[in-house]
């Protein structure tokens, strides 16, 4: 990745992670993306869907070899599920994660009258000076967690008077950092790294006059993947490359400095020929990759295939540690992922691999 594209990627990623977009509350991020896509409006066609999904198509007039790359911009989050008589705010989570992953986190409450309030997610026995060892002996569950609002409130009426009501969305503080050693740590690298990579790929394609070579190519941004509704508008494609986080941890092959080609997630194996195509591209172009299997993981491919879309799908992504918690990756992994995306963009369509 050339220096100018690396800087564009980093600047874009920081803006993305600092724009709240928990599933169901993604219109701020949608608007950010539409504004960012204006730089490409003379090179293709934009379509916006009712669920806030977006497609940008290069060479929309081409009818053969329809290929696409896809990432989701919705994230984990919470919403207010109950406000007790004394003003205590209870929460429901959006997306799949344990309460321990957000305990102690700073949050923002987004009201329907466009006000924003701050607070902290706490366990009901947060003070060890009061509860002693009880703090670490009780399991964390929804009924035992609450939102400490940074306002003087002592009743339901006090909370409602601020404009905070049941159903308001709550976003997690991202705390984005780029370390001198090349690590990126933040919430919501899943999957705002994928969004930033696609935008960087688009910029690379336009700057280097690659549009005639790539043919019909769509860049798809989905807004409900974390709740199983992401790519439900995708259709009429031959190939769909998903770019999402690769899970780093014990028993996994994925690493923070490589790109992962996922061969299977919780919904089943990805297309065999597409997988081989990506492996061949990586080998030919000396891209540092690993293969991995994710047992507790689904992606935008699941939505598309369950809807019966006749399309080959594959999944790649940068290695991200502590997924669905306070995540971390390294620029090396992002550079390798970008390299594979770029080679796929420039490659021929997937040829069916037949085993004799």
Image: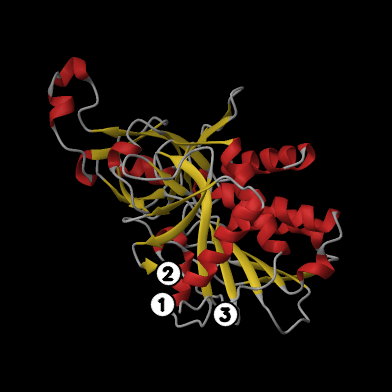
55 lies above or below 91: below
Mark 3 or mark 1: name the one nearer the start of the chain. 3
Mark 1 packing: few (<14 Cα in 10 Å), some, or many (20+)?
A: few
Residue under the image location 60 percent in, 29 percent down: 182
The numbered mark at residue 235 is 3
Could you tell me residue 261's position as x and y percent? 50, 55
CA separation in Å, label 2 and label 3? 13 Å
Q: Is residue 284 left or right of residue 138?
A: right
Query: Dividing the image into 4 quarters, which one contains the N terminus?
Result: top right
Q: Is residue 25 left or right of residue 286?
A: left
Report the residue that reaches farthest toward the top.
129
Residue that mark 1 sits on: 306
Kind of element beneath mark 2: helix
CA separation in Å, label 2 and label 1? 6 Å
Q: Are marks 2 and 1 in contact (CB under 8 Å)?
A: yes
Visible residue check, residue 315: yes
Q: Is residue 27 left or right of residue 263?
A: right
Visible residue check, residue 231: no
The numbered mark at residue 302 is 2
355 lies above or below 77: below
| Residue 70 picture quarter | bottom right
Query: Dividing the image into 4 quarters, which one contains the C terminus?
Result: bottom left
Could you tell me residue 161's position as x and y percent? 42, 44
Mark 2 or mark 3: name the one nearer the start of the chain. 3
Kind of element beneath mark 3: loop
Residue under the image location 82 percent in, 66 percent down: 211
Kind of element beneath mark 1: helix
Residue under the image location 61 percent in, 48 percent down: 287
Colour scheme of the rendered structure = secondary structure
- The front one of 279 and 293 is 279
123 lies above or below 94: above
Could you tell me residue 355's position as x and y percent? 46, 76
């Amino acid at each position: 990745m050339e220096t100018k594209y690396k800087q564009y990627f980093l600047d874009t990623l920081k803006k993305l992670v600092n724009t709240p977009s928990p599933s169901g509350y993604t219109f701020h991020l949608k608007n950010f993306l539409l504004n960012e896509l204006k730089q490409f409006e003379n090179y293709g066609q934009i379509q916006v869907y009712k669920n806030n999904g977006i497609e940008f198509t290069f060479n929309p007039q081409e009818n053969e070899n329809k290929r696409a790359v896809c990432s989701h911009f919705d994230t984990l989050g919470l919403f207010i599920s109950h406000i007790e008589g004394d003003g205590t705010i209870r929460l429901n989570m959006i997306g799949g994660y344990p309460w321990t992953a957000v305990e102690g986190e700073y949050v923002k409450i987004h009201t329907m009258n466009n006000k924003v309030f701050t607070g902290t997610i706490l366990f009901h026995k947060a003070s060890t000076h009061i509860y002693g060892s009880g703090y670490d002996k009780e399991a964390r569950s929804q009924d035992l967690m609450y939102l400490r609002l940074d306002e003087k409130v002592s009743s339901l009426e006090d909370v409602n008077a601020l404009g905070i009501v049941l159903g308001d969305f709550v976003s997690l503080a991202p705390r984005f950092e780029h370390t001198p050693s090349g690590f990126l740590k933040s919430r919501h690298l899943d999957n705002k790294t994928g969004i930033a990579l696609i935008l960087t790929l688009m910029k690379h394609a336009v700057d280097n006059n690659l549009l005639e070579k790539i043919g019909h190519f769509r860049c798809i941004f989905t807004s409900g993947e974390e709740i199983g509704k992401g790519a439900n508008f995708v259709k009429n494609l031959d190939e769909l490359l998903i770019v999402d986080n690769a899970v780093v941890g014990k028993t996994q092959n994925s690493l923070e400095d490589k790109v992962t080609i996922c061969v299977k997630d919780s919904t089943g194996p990805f297309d065999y020929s597409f997988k081989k195509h990506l492996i061949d591209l990586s080998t030919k172009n000396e891209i540092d990759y690993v293969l991995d299997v994710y047992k507790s993981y689904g992606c935008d491919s699941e939505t598309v295939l369950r809807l019966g879309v006749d399309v080959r799908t594959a999944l790649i992504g940068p290695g991200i540690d502590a997924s669905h918690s306070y995540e971390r990756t390294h620029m090396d992994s992002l550079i390798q992922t970008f390299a594979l995306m770029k080679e796929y963009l420039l490659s021929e369509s997937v040829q069916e691999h037949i085993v004799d």
